[in-house]
Image (cartoon, rainbow, N blue to C red):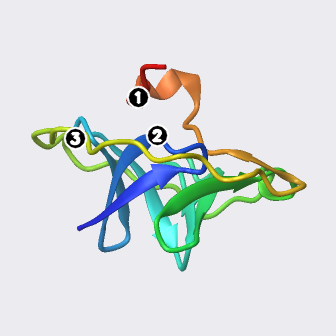
Amino acid sequence: MKPLWTWGGKFFGHRDGDNLWTHNGKHVGRFHNNEVYGPDGRYLGEVKIDDRLITCVGKKSWRKGSFTPDASRAGIIPYAGYVGYVMYAGYEDFSVPQNSEITVVQQSS
């Protein structure tokens, strides 16, 4: 399992094979190379710089085949966050759709 953070530095969860899991045990995506797609087949984002999730705005209309998420797993204690990277032009920080009922660890200021 490979831990992953958002581009902004918040711990998100991990990659296990071709699957993306949140820290609280929800299966929210499937990888196609370094790009991740949601259960409905919508592009969610991609991995850059080895362990950071980011979304390319120009790819938001991309689709792959849909899938049924695996059953939830036991969650893990979230890792500490990191300082975020400067955002690339044409990209935005990674997030999952609101209707997925997924939460990302919030950093205290």
Crowding at dot 1, Cα within 10 Å, few <14 / some 14-19 / many 20+, comes out as some
Q: State the mark number for residue 14.
A: none
Crowding at dot 3, Cα within 10 Å, few <14 / some 14-19 / many 20+, comes out as some
- Residue drawn at 49 percent across, 19 percent down: 109
State whether residue 85 is above or below residue 2.
above
Q: Position of residue 73 (x, y in %)?
A: 14, 43
Crowding at dot 2, Cα within 10 Å, few <14 / some 14-19 / many 20+, comes out as many
Amino acid carrying label 3: it is: Gly
- Residue drawn at 82 percent across, 57 percent down: 88
Q: Is residue 25 left or right of residue 53?
A: left
Whether residue 65 is visible here, answered yes or no, is no
Q: Are marks 2 and 1 in contact (CB under 8 Å)?
A: no
Instruction: Say which residue label 1 marks.
Output: 102
Badge 3 element: loop
The single residue placed furthest to the bottom in the displayed view is: 33
For the N terminus, the quadrant is bottom left
Whether residue 98 is visible here, answered yes or no, is yes
Badge 1 element: loop
Q: Are marks 3 and 2 in contact (CB under 8 Å)?
A: no
**Comes first in the chain, label 2 or label 1:** 2
Q: How far is disc 3 from disc 2 in space, using C-alphas? A: 16 Å
Q: How far is disc 3 from disc 1 in space, using C-alphas? A: 10 Å
State whether residue 56 is above or below residue 74.
below
Amino acid carrying label 1: it is: Ile
The foreground one among 23 and 10 is: 10
Badge 2 element: loop
Q: State the mark number for residue 25.
A: 3
Mark 2 vs mark 1: in front: 2
Q: Is residue 105 left or right of residue 8?
A: left
- Residue drawn at 62 percent across, 64 percent down: 64
Mark 3 vs mark 2: in front: 2
The foreground one among 73 and 89 is: 89
